[in-house]
Amino acid sequence: MTTIAPVGPDAGSRRLIYGHPEMLTDRSSHYCPGCGHGIIHRLVAELLDELELGPRTIGVASVGCSVFAYDYLPVDFVESPHGRAPAVATGVRRSRPDAFVFTYQGDGDLAAIGTAEIIHAAARGERISVIFVNNGIYGMTGGQMAPTTLLGQRTTSSPTGRDAAVAGYPLPITEMLALVPGVSYAARGSIADPGLIGRTKAMIRRAFEVQLAGGGLSIVEVLSTCPVGWGLTPVESMEHLAHDVVETYPLGVLVDRLLEPPRDRAEG
């Protein structure tokens, strides 16, 4: 479905304000009210359309709420064991060098059980794109503390709030990966408001373009919401995301090595 709105004093000109992406399945969402996955699915679908990647795309979904991406993005998908999406994507990439390959992972998956997988895929500079959805909690399994849970945040496994002396500090996984030479692009966006959603789409587009240009691993961390796990309303969750979460996880592009000039060996 496409919606056209009149613009201008005489309403004689028109602009597109809504169009359903071809690469987004037309079905009702099963996600909880206020969950950010639907927004992120749409961004990925729009870019698959705009870059004409659908027919050659192979997605890899891991375990968690993120796994259901294959219900909404009508491309070939492989479901990997928990945390192993980068390893599975490596196999897909090396056996199908002509394909466009991306993983879609949550924070409990990528930053906890899958920490080693993502770090070593980055070290190898695998030509894959990673969509890393960070809502700071284990949403599917009951709201337990994740590696990205904020200090002081209450979860079912930290009912008095995350204490650094007991559970350590939130893991800045994207900053860590940005240090690895095999990572060509790393950025962090948010879905807290329409403007930030637009910026996040631009980040994902760049990550996809880096893969198409032959770069190494590209990753976009997307700060998202989990109203049920956070014990907040959808509106409160967006406010928390906009004002509190970004204090721990600042937004922006961390590295874009394809834009950096070559380093002169004489400079050390």
Image (cartoon, rainbow, N blue to C red):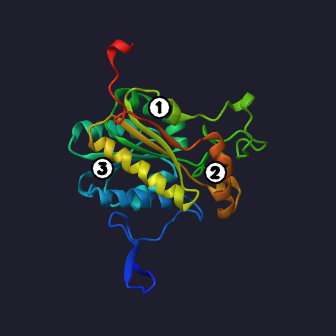
Q: Position of residue 228 (x, y in %)?
A: 65, 58
**Would residue 250 appear left or right of 100 to someone viewing this image?**
right
Q: Within 10 angstroms of label 1, few (less than 14), some, or many (20 or more) residues?
A: many
Residue 177 numbered mark, or none: 1
Q: Can you see residue 79?
A: no
Under mark 2, the amino acid is Gly
Q: Disc 2 or 3, which lies upstream in sequence? A: 3
Residue found farthest to the front: 9
Q: Quadrant of residue 212?
A: top left
Q: Position of residue 97 (x, y in %)?
A: 22, 40
Q: Nearer the viewer, residue 144 or 195?
A: 195
Looking at the image, residue 58 lies above or below residue 4 = above
Under mark 1, the amino acid is Leu
Q: Nearer the viewer, mark 2 or mark 3?
A: 3
- Residue at image location 35% in from the left, 27% down from the top: 124
Residue identified by numbered label 3: 58
Residue identified by numbered label 2: 142
Query: Alpha carbon of mark 3 to alpha carbon of mark 1: how far?
Result: 23 Å
**Would residue 138 appear left or right of 117 to someone viewing this image?**
right
Q: Within 10 angstroms of label 2, few (less than 14), some, or many (20 or more) residues?
A: few
Q: Disc 3 or 1, which lies upstream in sequence? A: 3
Query: Alpha carbon of mark 1 to alpha carbon of mark 2: how far?
Result: 28 Å
Q: Secondary structure at mark 1?
A: helix
**Would residue 42 appear left or right of 32 to someone viewing this image?**
left
Q: Position of residue 264 (x, y in %)?
A: 33, 18
Residue found farthest to the right: 160
Q: Within 10 angstroms of label 3, few (less than 14), some, or many (20 or more) residues?
A: many
- Residue at image location 49% in from the left, 67% down from the top: 29
Placement of the C terminus among the 4 image quadrants:
top left
Q: Disc 1 or 2, which lies upstream in sequence? A: 2
Under mark 3, the amino acid is Ile
